[in-house]
Image (cartoon, helix red, strand yellow):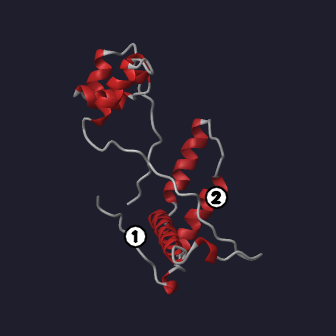
């Protein structure tokens, strides 16, 4: 599995400069955060004012920069405090560092492993086919059956519903 690449920032690059336009865009968003608009005229006015504000792209680039900078800091902290034993980590009034207990995920060692385990559990009456199937997602059943999720939903609309996920905003 390929490792996820982390963009590392040099200390002098952590403080970005922001134009007045980007600051105005942020100020507009901040001033209007949480305001519910129900009247069509108010909505039209808001949209018009929002669209007249410049600086949104730069503000979004700043958000992206901060996300990458946070990832860089996290990566550097993990590397820095991974050196030495847990007993050698700082533990003072000003700074206390510790690692969470190591956890692991369980995976099948072979493609047939899950079949053997499931068949044995069913044979021993420790679990039923119905119980196992109730733990499967629509996606998993779709994958196992070789059907696309849309086709599965079309075949069984009385059992499957589509729930909307959060929309992702893209600014370019």
Q: Secondary structure at mark 2?
A: helix
Residue at x 57%, y 36% (from the top left corner): 40
Q: Quadrant of residue 143?
A: top left
Residue at x 41%, y 27% (from the top left corner): 162
Q: Is residue 167 above or below residue 136?
A: below
122 or 26, nearer to the observer = 122
Mark 1–mark 2 Cα distance, whole angstroms, equals 30 Å
Residue 30 disc label: 2
On the rendered structure, is 159 left or right of 149? Answer: right
Q: Secondary structure at mark 1?
A: loop
Residue at label 1?
6
Q: Is residue 117 above or below residue 15?
A: above
Residue 77 coordinates in the image, percent (x, y): 54, 74
74 or 42, nearer to the observer = 74
Residue at x 36%, y 63% (from the top left corner): 4
81 or 10, nearer to the observer = 81
- Image depth: mark 1 or mark 2 in front: 1
On the rendered structure, is 171 left or right of 97? Answer: left
CB of mark 1 within 8 Å of CB of mark 2?
no
Q: Is residue 2 above or below residue 105?
A: below
Residue 88 coordinates in the image, percent (x, y): 62, 77
């Amino acid at each position: 599995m390929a490792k996820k690449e982390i963009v590392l920032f040099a200390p002098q690059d952590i403080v970005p400069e922001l134009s007045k336009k980007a600051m105005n865009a942020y100020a507009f968003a901040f001033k209007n955060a949480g305001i519910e608009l129900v009247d069509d005229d108010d909505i039209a006015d808001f949209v018009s004012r929002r669209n007249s504000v410049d600086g949104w792209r730069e503000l979004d680039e700043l958000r992206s920069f901060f996300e990458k900078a946070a990832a860089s800091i996290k990566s550097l902290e993990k590397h820095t405090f991974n050196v030495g034993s847990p007993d050698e980590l700082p533990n003072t009034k000003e700074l206390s560092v510790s690692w969470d207990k190591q956890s692991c995920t369980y995976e099948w060692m072979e493609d047939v492993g899950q079949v053997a385990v499931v068949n044995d559990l069913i044979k021993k009456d420790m679990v039923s086919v119905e119980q196992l199937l109730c733990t499967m997602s629509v996606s998993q059943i779709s994958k196992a059956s070789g059907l696309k999720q849309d086709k599965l939903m079309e075949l069984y609309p009385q059992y499957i519903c589509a729930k909307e996920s959060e929309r992702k905003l893209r600014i370019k």
